[in-house]
């Protein structure tokens, strides 16, 4: 025991010594145009590990296409596991900013982590490109000159669904989502457009995030006599909700609609036929037939042996934004204001369509939100687009970025 | 005002959930009572059971075969874990043992990820219980009805084993006073290994049973472990009866909490636990604290 302690102490001391010795060299090389450091704060373990994985893989695909070199500088990714825990994510953010001195930061998946890291990022003038977390505030009163978002605001996939559901599915809805900020954001956006379109909310229910047994909630739905359920669930929650919805005999009698995460390819195989017929709104489906997506999907499938999903598209776009902006500024990451200005103007053909940021909020303008239905197609179940709504931008209420 | 049918339907939900908690907590409470070890890896055995079930159903296409074989596999893992890792630590402070079982959580999670990946995997249930049935006018998934019947049958079988057989009396004696039992000429180490393996096998069994309801994913053991620990506290350490009654109480409390006070569902089970511990610090059927 003593020996072990002494040994680990020695190892630690040696590592610290090496750190001191290497430190100045790192600084020098940085000034001479060393690697561009990109810090990733994503979940690599736990329930949402798969999301972090998809985002990272798609980024690697784009950087590999550029041979990991842009404008003469190497691209270096520093990955940190946030474990989906806000305190961990915030600590890792501080590490990436203060000791790794990353040039660009991306992540996280969890809205709570995003809100927690926001002030650190803003005050240290670090460029953050959000690659998943949808907290509306980041495009509203907590928007920042230094923060961009390539993924979505929680409002975006849901708002277009309100009128569509009222017109095509049912005028009365029972709404369900996990009890946390994103869940309430997502349902809030649906209500915001469903009610003015003549819809009525019969009841709302907020099960715990990470629930495994929805029986009590499903029994309530059944006994409410509702004709339609609108739901937001993601990851394992989405699998368990959809499967148990079927087991309780609701699938055939009460229509199910929701935000796209409910039936993304990370959960569809596990949901199986229980997911057939579910209608969701999302900015992406792997079936989009634009040339960028066809190429992206083929390369992604070949390299990672799985289908692309919205998360992969977010990773692709994040990396594409970085590559294009770095090329425009010729690899100069020292002039941060110039880099921010350049990122804000980046436009390209993304797998989801024409990609551009909203200058008012630095949040992506969704070229389309697709209304998708789960159907059996070649290669298994997938989200088949049946309708679409163009140019969906977050209202950005309370955001004071210069337009 | 909820109708009688509402109450009945939710009580059925609570019963199927409670029975699942029972299968899990009975193993934990026996290990706890006998070995004085808080086995934090109990949730991992549950998860291993689900994945072993997944693999066996994949290989044989037969749910029932998996229901028998998966717990045996998990029991073997438990036996090896006790014999090789836990036994050398019995003379050390309890915290070292807890730390070891905590380490197992990460070990097993990584092993499962390595073999099956991190994605959630669906476990097909037996075909004959695919539909739903009417129970006094309330439609209810027939698989959950099977879970209730199966769990209650297991409770009876376990009661017979522990109260009516020689092996059972050795286990009861071991829970009461391990040292004295060893003094009576029983090879207590072998009993320790056996109880640990048996507890792990029961956790594995609940994993297979839970699979068709909540699928399999590497982190599935963490959440359920907390409920199981609460059940053990409520029922009393080392008591089979306590584990059954505690599971049914917590199952109902959480189910009705979720149905009627969704914001306070978790609070509800903690309130129930706090009340019971206030009135009976040793739990409902635990031995009085010395």
Image (cartoon, coloured by chain):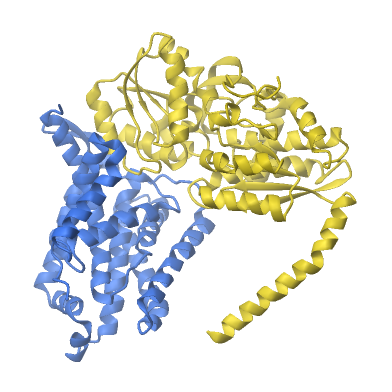
Chain colours: A yellow, B blue
Query: Measuring 13% from the left and 30% from the top, which residue is drawn there?
Result: B5
The reply to whether residue A270 is in sight is yes
Residue B157 position in % (x across, y down)? 15, 62
In this view, B240 is above or below B50: below
Residue A334 position in % (x across, y down)? 83, 42
Viewer-closest of A122 and B69? A122
In this image, A327 relative to B39: left or right? right
Q: Quadrant of residue B162?
A: bottom left
Residue B52 position in % (x across, y down)? 39, 58
Query: Measuring 42% from the left and 19% from the top, which residue is drawn there?
Result: A191
Q: Quadrant of residue B10?
A: top left
Query: Measuring 19% from the left and 48% from the top, which residue is drawn there?
Result: B148
In this view, A346 is above or below A241: above
Q: Quadrant of the C terminus of chain A?
A: top right
In this image, B189 relative to B48: left or right? left
Residue B206 position in % (x across, y down)? 29, 55
């Amino acid at each position: 025991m003593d020996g072990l302690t002494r040994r680990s102490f020695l190892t630690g001391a040696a590592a610290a010594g090496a750190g001191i010795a290497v430190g100045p060299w790192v600084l020098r090389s940085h000034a001479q145009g060393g690697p561009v450091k990109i810090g990733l704060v994503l979940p690599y373990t736990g329930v949402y590990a798969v999301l972090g994985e998809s985002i990272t893989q798609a980024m690697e695909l784009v950087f590999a296409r550029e041979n990991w070199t842009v404008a003469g500088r190497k691209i270096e990714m520093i990955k940190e596991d946030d474990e989906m825990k806000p305190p961990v994510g915030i600590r890792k953010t501080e590490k990436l900013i203060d000791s790794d001195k990353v040039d660009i930061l991306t992540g996280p998946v969890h809205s709570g982590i995003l809100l927690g890291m926001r002030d650190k990022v803003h005050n240290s003038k670090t460029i953050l490109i959000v690659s998943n977390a949808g907290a509306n505030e980041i495009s509203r009163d907590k928007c920042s000159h230094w923060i961009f978002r390539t993924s979505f605001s929680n409002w975006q996939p849901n708002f277009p669904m309100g009128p569509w559901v009222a017109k095509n599915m049912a005028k009365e809805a029972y709404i369900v989502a996990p009890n946390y900020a994103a869940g309430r954001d997502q349902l809030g956006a649906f209500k915001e457009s469903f009610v003015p379109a003549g819809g009525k909310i019969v009841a709302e229910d907020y099960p715990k995030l990470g629930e495994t047994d929805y029986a009590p909630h499903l029994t309530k739905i059944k006994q409410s006599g509702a004709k339609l359920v609108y739901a937001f669930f993601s990851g394992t929650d989405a699998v368990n909700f959809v499967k148990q919805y079927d087991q309780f005999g609701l699938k055939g009698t009460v229509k199910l609609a929701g935000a796209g995460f409910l039936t993304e390819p990370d959960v569809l195989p596990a949901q199986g036929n229980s997911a057939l017929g579910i209608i969701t709104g999302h900015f992406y489906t792997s079936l989009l037939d634009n040339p960028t997506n066809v190429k992206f999907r083929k390369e992604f499938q070949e390299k990672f042996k799985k289908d692309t999903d919205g998360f992969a598209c977010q990773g692709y776009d994040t990396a594409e934004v970085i590559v294009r902006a770095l090329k425009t500024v010729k690899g100069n990451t020292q002039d941060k204001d110039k880099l921010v200005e350049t990122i804000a103007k980046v436009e390209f053909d993304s797998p989801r369509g024409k990609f551009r940021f909203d200058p008012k909020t630095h949040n992506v303008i969704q070229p389309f939100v697709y209304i998708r239905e789960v159907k059996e197609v070649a290669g298994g179940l997938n989200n088949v687009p049946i309708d679409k709504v163009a140019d969906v931008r977050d209202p950005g209420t309370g955001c004071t970025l210069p337009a | 005002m909820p109708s009688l049918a509402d109450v009945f339907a939710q009580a059925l939900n609570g019963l199927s959930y409670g029975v699942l908690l029972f299968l899990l907590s009975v193993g934990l409470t026996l290990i706890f009572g006998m070995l004085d070890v808080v086995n934090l890896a109990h949730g991992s055995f549950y998860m291993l059971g689900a994945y072993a079930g997944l693999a066996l159903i994949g290989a044989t296409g037969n749910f029932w075969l998996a229901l028998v074989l998966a717990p045996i596999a998990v029991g073997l893992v438990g036996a090896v874990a006790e014999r090789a890792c836990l036994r050398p630590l019995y003379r050390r402070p309890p915290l070292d043992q807890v730390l070891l079982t905590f380490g197992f959580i990460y070990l097993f999670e990584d092993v499962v990820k390595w073999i099956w990946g991190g994605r959630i995997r669906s476990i097909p249930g037996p075909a004959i219980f695919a539909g739903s049935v009417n129970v006094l006018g309330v439609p209810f998934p027939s698989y959950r009805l099977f879970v209730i019947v199966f769990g209650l049958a297991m409770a009876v079988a376990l009661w017979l084993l522990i109260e009516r057989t020689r092996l059972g009396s050795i286990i009861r004696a071991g829970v009461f006073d391990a040292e004295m039992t060893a003094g009576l000429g029983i090879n207590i180490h072998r009993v320790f290994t056996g109880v640990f393996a048996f507890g792990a096998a029961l956790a594995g069994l609940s994993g297979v049973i839970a699979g068709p309801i909540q699928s399999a994913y590497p982190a599935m053991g963490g959440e359920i472990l907390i409920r199981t620990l609460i059940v053990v506290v409520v029922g009393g350490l080392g008591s089979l009866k306590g584990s059954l009654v505690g599971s049914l109480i917590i199952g109902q409390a959480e189910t009705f909490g979720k149905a009627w006070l969704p914001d306070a569902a978790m609070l509800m089970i903690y309130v129930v636990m706090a009340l019971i511990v206030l009135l009976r610090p040793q739990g409902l059927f635990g031995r009085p604290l010395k």
